Image: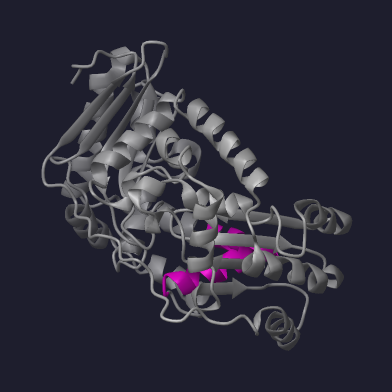
Amino acid sequence: MYAIVAYGSRYEPDAQAGLASLVGDLLDEGTETRAAQDIALAIEATGARLNTFGGYARSGLSLTALRDDFPQLLDVAADLLRHSRFPEERFAQCQARRLAQLRSRADDARTVASDAFDELVYLGHPARRPIVGYESTVSALTADDARSAYARFFAPNNLLVAVVGDLPVAEMERRLLESLGDWPAAPGFSLPAAPPVERQAAPRQRVIPRPDKEQIHILLGHLGIPRAHPDYYALRVMDVILGDSPGMTARIPRLLRDDLGLAYTTYANITATAGVDPGRFVAYVGTSPENQSKSIAAIRSELERIQQEPVAPEELVAAKAYLTGSFVFNFETNAQRALFLIETEVHGLGADYARRYPALIEAITAEDILRAAQTHLNPLALTTIVAGPVAADAA
């Protein structure tokens, strides 16, 4: 079972950055009738798995349990969704852990580079902030802040539930209604509006000197597309060809790793982060400082190439075969199936999406990819981030 609400860092004010992530972590730390230890024991005694989370646009929980244990654990899950109370001592412990994580996070040059990339790509938009917030904002949060956000966003008219498993649909529906059916709707509920965000029209750049590191981390890119964009499928095939296929056989990894010997870790994609808001197009390479200029030039050359030349027939066939052949791996477990149902509902993909997906991919042509690349990539207006042992004025 997945049970989610539309709540996350997307809906936080700047001063409360990181709150949704804490709310998600604290969902199972006690309710009005269950202590945190009681919840943990109920899960452990049955060998079930309960995870709670707070992300960018969604928060909630997932539950994996045996069929016979599901009814009683559904009651526990419903209790967390409806009656979590965020005890002061548990909040303080979680807040302290998060602050320690943020300090550790600041030592990771690749993470720092990624955060800086988001700041420049999403100017003025909530997506510019890390989901986990900042030390300055997290340290100022209180348990009352968590309770207020929980009371506002955890409501049945903001709830989406998917259950997959060895129970008849009618029985699943009955049990869900027994646990959640008398939950009163929040009157007048509406989600805060996120400001619009547009793709940059000029280059942006930031250099982050980290003299204590050996490797530099380079990110190039700009704003991408939302998941519901009609060009998603052409760009998904393009991603596999350009920089996001298994075994590093895509163009950018093959060029930078195999042909030029500049890096081992490198990729590029535009669809990986497509969501309710536009994701990001990003090309990444981790390399030695002396390879900076050559690596950037190589990535730019491949971006220009995919905008100027139709992809080769064998590349197109291989990319589509990979995407249609690997699609089945989204359904190996009931948890994956439940998450797939959530995704199709959130993005309005339709109940028959699993059946239609192979045809959507097979229909993509080289001309579709060329047009989509020309529309959604702009090598002349990239955000460029370089973090590592480089001078502050390095280009």
From the viewer's perspective, tell me whether residue 200 is left or right of residue 158. left
- Going 45% across and 79% down the picture, which residue do you hit? 350
- Going 57% across and 54% down the picture, which residue do you hit? 24
From the viewer's perspective, tell me whether residue 341 is left or right of residue 205. right
Vertical position of residue 77 compared to residue 124: above or below: below
Image quarter (top left, top right, bottom left or bottom right) of the C terminus: top left
User: Residue 273 appears at what percent x and percent y?
Assistant: 39, 52
User: Residue 182 appears at what percent x and percent y?
Assistant: 65, 84
Q: Which residues are magenta?
A: 326-348
From the viewer's perspective, tell me whether residue 310 is left or right of residue 29. left
Main SS, magenta residues: helix
Based on the displayed image, in which of its 4 quarters is residue 305 positioned? top left
Number of numbered discs visible in the structure rendering: 0
- Going 24% across and 40% down the picture, which residue do you hit? 120
Q: Nearer the viewer, residue 173 or 75?
A: 75
Q: Nearer the viewer, residue 251 or 64?
A: 64
- Going 41% across and 42% down the picture, which residue do you hit? 130
Vertical position of residue 149 compared to residue 282: above or below: below
Residue 303 magenta-highlighted: no
Q: Report whether residue 213 is seen.
A: yes
User: Residue 371 appears at what percent x and percent y?
Assistant: 19, 59
From the viewer's perspective, tell me whether residue 81 is left or right of residue 196. right
Based on the displayed image, in which of its 4 quarters is residue 195 positioned? bottom left
User: Residue 89 appears at what percent x and percent y?
Assistant: 66, 44
Image quarter (top left, top right, bottom left or bottom right) of the N terminus: bottom right
